[in-house]
Image (cartoon, grey):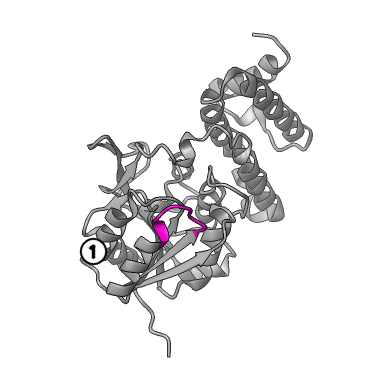
Amino acid sequence: MKITPKISVLVPCYNVEKYVAQCLDSILSQTIKDIEVICINDGSTDNTLSILRSFEKIDGRVKVLDKSNSGYGDSMNHGLALCLGKYIGIVESDDFIEPNMFEVLYDTAEKFNLEIARCCYFEFKNGTNEPVYNEWVPKNILIDPNVEKSVFSQAPAIWCSIYKNSWLKENHIKFLPTPGASYQDTSFAFKAYACARRVMMLDTPMLHYRLDNQNSSINSPGKVYCVCDEWDEIYRFVRSNKKKFGHLFPIMPVLQYGTYKWNLDRLDSGLRTKFLAHWALEILQHLIKGELPLHKLDPNYRSKILSVLRQSLGFK
């Protein structure tokens, strides 16, 4: 008979020998003890696997899945399939968490029968913490994301949430299994919020999101079009059930603009030109399909989106 832990914690790992011990120490020191920790080693070439094995030997709650390198999304889907917990949490292997994070999230999810419970987080860089609150999103109250759509406008930050396991499976919510690790929380978070009806955002930061790891995907300009794959998946998902999700079309261009603009700004001039052309082509395709309702957009964002077309054609 399989025992159901309260929370399954997924820890995707790739060449994180410098950080993973701190990450696992923070998870195993949680005030909630009834957890399982599933570490997915995605073909690391450094000492990551041996560190994971050492934790597996000393704490029976730790399970290590060692696999050849296939990218973040595929690794996470392998992990999701193994989860036995009532809820699933995700902690990136270069981050660390406050001792009571999962207990607070679990108690909140149980009290309000939530599909998603999320806390705020700290941006951690060079030993300093800067809290991120996303003040425009309501906190500590029950939210239906399909009514309170501000939920979609915050960073995906899937690693400061827990998700009801049975609900993820019922809605077939998985990661896009593309290579690399850039942006692969984007479509997962969107699909989760689109399917959710009971969500709560807590106003306390409890996760330390590391920004000083130079190997992090956010510091990799080589993965230029990964964000495009994620948005292709989001549009595919919404098109698959327009009756249920079609009301989200008006907010999607604004959300997409934010992620594409962030990606564009970190590229060198040569890559910027190519990405801008790709972006402009996507805008035209969405206009042709009737998926870009310009008349419903905030005038500021309508102007910004149209400026992408002008820039791609050489106009300022």
Percent x, y of residue 260? 57, 31
Whether 112 is among the magenta residues is no
In the image, what residue occupies the spot 25% across and 58% down? 26
Residue 301 in sight from this viewpoint: yes
| Tag count | 1
Residue 99 found in image quarter: bottom left
Q: Nearer the viewer, residue 243 or 67?
A: 67
Mark 1: which secondary structure?
Answer: loop
Left or right of 99 in this view: 270: right
Residue 132 in sight from this viewpoint: no
Residue range corresponding to the magenta coloring = 42-49
Percent x, y of residue 211? 36, 37
Vertical relation: 316 (above or below) 307 = above
Left or right of 148 in this view: 129: left
Q: Nearer the viewer, residue 207 or 115?
A: 207
Which residue lies under the disc numbered 1?
A: 30
Please name the predominant secondary structure of the magenta segment in the image: loop
Vertical relation: 288 (above or below) 316 = below
Residue 244 found in image quarter: bottom right
- Amino acid, disc 1: Gln
Q: Residues within 10 Å of mark 1 (few under 14, many from 20)?
A: some
Q: Nearer the viewer, residue 298 or 15?
A: 15
Q: Nearer the viewer, residue 135 or 232?
A: 232
In the image, what residue occupies the spot 61% across and 41% down? 226
| Quarter containing the N terminus | bottom left
| Quarter containing the C terminus | top right
In the image, what residue occupies the spot 44% across and 41% down? 216
Left or right of 139 in this view: 263: right
Whether 46 is among the magenta residues is yes
Question: Residue extending furthest bottom?
Answer: 1
